[in-house]
């Protein structure tokens, strides 16, 4: 813009001087030499004044170019001037500072090579095409990889700059560091996700409590009321039946509370892995014998190298009891449950627990290790939804892993894998 103005100023001044000279030439035919000399002096003074004006304009022009250069260089955002191919032809100080590269290392290179990976480069390519096609200012959130390997979240704003004839001159892409903003946004997103998770957890907890606590408490209350009524000697059998119901309800409640405590201890890092040598076959037999089998038949196969397994037996027992308890709970009675334990040549301990029960719905497979989660087909079956979550945490504490395969209405097999510590 300043170039145009100055061109106009110079040509106007030149025109005016030429007109004056022409008018002097015209007049010189009729005037006396003294008059002519006087007129010449006047015009000379005028020319000197115009010359002075010209110098001032020139100085303004230089100052204004300096100002623009300063503005360009000291701008708080990175400025990149690119040709039609996206090659950098100029960059300001902030631009090279943000990328951690000297101006000379940037000029001549495609702007896109400094973006963090193919996906951001493709986005920028599309962005540049749109700006060049529409001629409109466009924005693009992106990411750059700096020389030191760190990444920076940036906001690119691009616009086409055309010459007086409306022909493409260059593309101007500015970029500002929005890393902080992006980090803050991610934090907020994370906090929101956590909040949604928490509220989901809360509602699952309430459902669990109302199912798992209300039923045994109602049983206990009604049994107590009936015992109170059965006061005759011949009612002894009925009283015993209700005492039995109370005992089993209280046992169920105690088990729920103990699961809560175990999980709480794990989450507060109060449980540690303390491996020692034990007989794996004996431990498995023991867990099977303690189970409330409900008419199921257990088939246990094992390799013969499991007398000296080096793991935390106490933690493994809790895990096995949970997995085997589920196999019983979620398969029909009478039915078969198969257990296999083995130690491979590489020293890996493998435990397989297979049932022929209700299976786990495909769309819920990813969630069954979550706290208080119960699959839809297990809704009416008693359970807190804490067993698998606790088991998974204990197994990971022992450095092992748990996985499963399941088919709806056909059965499930859980696989536990450990390396001896
Ligand atoms: P729960 O106390 O409900 O059994 P778990 O955490 O042990 O809680 O299991 C979570 C859910 O995983 C169960 O509610 C059930 O939907 C599913 N599940 C676990 N084991 C089995 C299995 N052997 N067969 C079918 N579903 C299972």
Image (tube, rainbow, N blue to C red):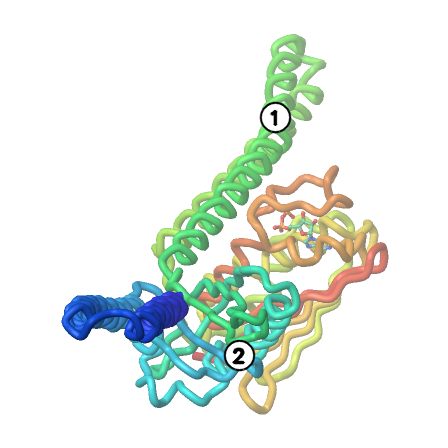
> Which of 421 and 112 lies nearest the eye of the viewer?
112
Mark 2 closeness class: few <14, some 14–19, many ≥20 residues within 10 Å: few
Query: In terms of secondary structure, where does tag 2 sit?
Result: loop
Say whether residue 95 is left or right of residue 133.
left
Q: Position of residue 306 (x, y in %)?
A: 56, 80
Mark 1 closeness class: few <14, some 14–19, many ≥20 residues within 10 Å: few
Quadrant assignment for the N terminus? bottom left
Q: Residue at x 14, y 71 (%)?
A: 34
Q: Residue at x 58, y 44 (%)?
A: 372
Say whether residue 84 is left or right of residue 292.
left
> Which of 327 and 21 lies nearest the eye of the viewer?
21
Report the disc number at residue 117.
2
**Quarter where residue 149 is shown:** bottom left
Disc 2 to disc 1, how far (Cα)?
56 Å
Report the disc number at residue 214.
1
Vertical relation: 303 (above or below) 34: below
Quadrant assignment for the C terminus? bottom left
**Quarter where residue 221 is shown:** top right
Q: Earlier in the sequence, mark 2 or mark 1?
A: 2
Q: Residue at x 51, y 76 (%)?
A: 170
> Which of 104 and 358 lies nearest the eye of the viewer?
104
Q: Position of residue 81 (x, y in %)?
A: 44, 76
The count of marks equals 2
């Amino acid at each position: 813009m300043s170039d145009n103005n100055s061109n106009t100023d110079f040509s106007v001044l030149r025109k005016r001087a030429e007109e004056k000279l022409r008018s002097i030439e015209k007049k010189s035919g009729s005037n006396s030499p003294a008059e002519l000399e006087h007129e010449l002096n006047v015009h000379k003074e005028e020319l000197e004044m115009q010359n002075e004006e010209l110098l001032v304009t020139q100085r303004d022009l230089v100052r204004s170019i300096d100002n623009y250069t300063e503005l360009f260089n000291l701008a708080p955002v990175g400025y990149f001037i690119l040709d039609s191919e996206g090659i950098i032809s100029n960059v300001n100080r902030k631009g090279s500072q943000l990328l951690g590269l000297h101006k000379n290392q940037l000029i001549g290179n495609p702007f896109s090579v400094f973006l963090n990976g193919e996906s951001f480069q493709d986005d920028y390519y599309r962005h540049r095409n749109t700006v060049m096609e529409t001629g409109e200012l466009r924005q693009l959130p992106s990411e750059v990889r700096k020389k030191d390997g760190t990444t920076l979240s940036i906001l690119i704003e691009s616009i086409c700059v055309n010459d007086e004839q409306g022909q493409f001159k260059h593309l101007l892409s500015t970029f500002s560091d929005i890393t902080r903003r992006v980090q803050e946004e991610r934090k907020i997103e994370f906090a929101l996700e956590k909040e949604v998770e928490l509220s989901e957890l809360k509602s699952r907890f309430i459902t669990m409590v109302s199912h798992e606590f209300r039923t045994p408490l109602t049983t206990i209350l009604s049994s107590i009321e009936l015992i109170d009524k059965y006061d005759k000697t011949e009612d002894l059998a009925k009283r015993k039946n209700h005492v039995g119901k109370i005992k089993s309800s209280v046992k169920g409640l105690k088990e729920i509370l103990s699961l809560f405590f175990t999980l709480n201890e794990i989450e507060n890092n109060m449980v540690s892995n303390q491996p020692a040598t034990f007989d794996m076959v004996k431990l498995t037999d023991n867990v099977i014998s303690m189970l409330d089998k409900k008419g199921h038949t257990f088939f246990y196969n094992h390799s013969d190298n499991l007398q000296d397994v080096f793991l935390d037996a106490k933690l493994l027992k809790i895990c096995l009891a949970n997995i085997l308890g589920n196999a019983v709970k979620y398969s029909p009675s009478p039915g078969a449950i198969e257990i296999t334990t083995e130690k491979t040549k590489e020293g890996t301990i493998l435990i397989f627990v297979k049932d022929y029960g209700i299976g786990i719905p495909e769309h819920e497979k990813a969630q069954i290790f979550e706290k208080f989660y119960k699959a839809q087909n297990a809704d009416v079956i008693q359970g807190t939804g804490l067993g698998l979550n606790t088991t998974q945490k204990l197994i990971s504490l022992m450095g092992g892993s748990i996985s499963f395969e399941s088919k709806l209405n056909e059965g499930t097999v859980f696989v536990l894998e450990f390396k001896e510590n």
